[in-house]
Amino acid sequence: MRYILLMSNMFDYFLWRGDLDFDQSPFNPADNVIFCQLSYLPMDGIVPALADGMASGISIGLVMDILSKNLQSDLTDDKPHLMFKDDPALIDALGSSRRFRDCKLFDYVNHIDSDHEKQFSAVSANTGDDSCSVIYRGTDFTFVGWKEDANMSFQEAIPAQLEAVDYLEKIASNFKGPLRIGGHSKGGNLAVYAASFCSKKTQKRITEIYSNDAPGFHEHIIDSEGFTSIKDRIRSFVPQGSVVGMIFEHGYDYTVIKSSQSGLLQHDLYSWQMTHNNMVQVDHITAGSRFVDKTLKDWIGSLDNESREQFLSALYGILSASGAKTIPEFESDWFNAAVRMIKSIGKIDSSTRDLVRKTLAELFNAASKNLDTLYKTKK
């Protein structure tokens, strides 16, 4: 076994490296995880859009100070809506860390378009080492965000991927140094996609592409010339019980890291274990993760694009009938939301109901055929 018994997360990393800037201690995979988690913070109206290059940047320390004051506000409308329970601690750590507080953030964007089924958010950072980090946010708690992720099963390119390319090109035209790209979950997918389909001039400036427990791609993308050109610069990480990172095809290797959580909760970056300049690695994914990987690939492979689209559209329609637009909204009124969903099922035409039943049957069939992977040990 390559890993050591060390239960240390990003907050321990702040104690180890927080007093060293990026010139003293170069950017490493642990920094990548922290920037990815930072991208989930609500920075609307705080981090400015890109106007005059780097002149419009704002320090991480000042951003965290504003967020912290907003959290303490008595006005409900002024309080930022945080996605994770550890976000307040992250805000405090980033604001007091010499390593991060003076880094300049710029061009924060957060676009949600239900009509076009698009959820896209990104922010860029000048880390003070002559490099620019472009960070793509993963899927938020909106249902449209999850629907867009699912659309990757039958679309060669989703709206967020196309916007990710435009965003990268915009940053590249306003920043002249090396580019570092990364993201968590769908954000990691967007990072790889943007690097694959940006201009060759921009591609040459990309030093690293970080993909953290991110879903894969349509086969067309993996076979593209652009993907082949940047594949050796991708640094992919998945937790040992990865689920999200096993979805679709990837076309590149990954490093398995240690999480303090179990099952799907390992997707949470706060649970990822760190060393002084890296993450704690393990030899292989768990049997459960292998089972999910094989089952999902077999299931999706058994469906043509039209069936995938019709099935997902039906499920999304049922979910939308709940009246909620986000997971927290659903949870706050789950009983009434569930009643509305059940009523909507009765309104679905018989052909669609048959499609849903058949598709779910294919899923259970794929799962039953791969039960043996739960009992095999394979590196």
Image (cartoon, helix red, strand yellow):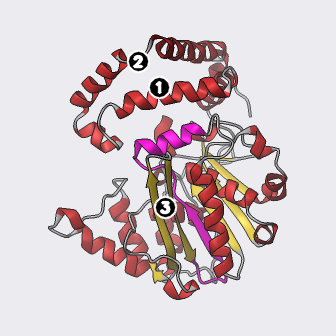
Residue type, numbered disc 1: Ala
Which residue is under mark 3? 10
Residue type, numbered disc 3: Met
Q: Which mark is residue 304?
A: none
Residue at horizontal 69 percent and vertical 72 percent from the top: 179
Q: Which mark is residue 348?
A: 2
Residue type, numbered disc 2: Ile
**Residue 4, percent from left and from top:** 60, 50
Decide which of tag 1 and tag 3 comes sooner along the chain. Answer: 3
Which mark is in front, 2 or 3? 2
Q: Which mark is residue 314?
A: 1
Mark 2, secondary structure of its residue = loop
**The C terminus lies in quadrant:** top right
Q: Which residues are magenta?
A: 126-151
Horizontal placement of 88 versus 288: left or right? left
**Residue 86, percent from left and from top:** 36, 57
Residue at horizontal 73 percent and vertical 63 percent from the top: 198
For disc 2, the neighbor class at 10 Å (few under 14, some 14 to 19, many from 20) is few
Query: Between 264 and 169, which is closer to the camera in this rendering?
Result: 169
- Is residue 251 among the parts visible in the rendering? no
Q: Are marks 1 and 2 in contact (CB under 8 Å)?
A: yes
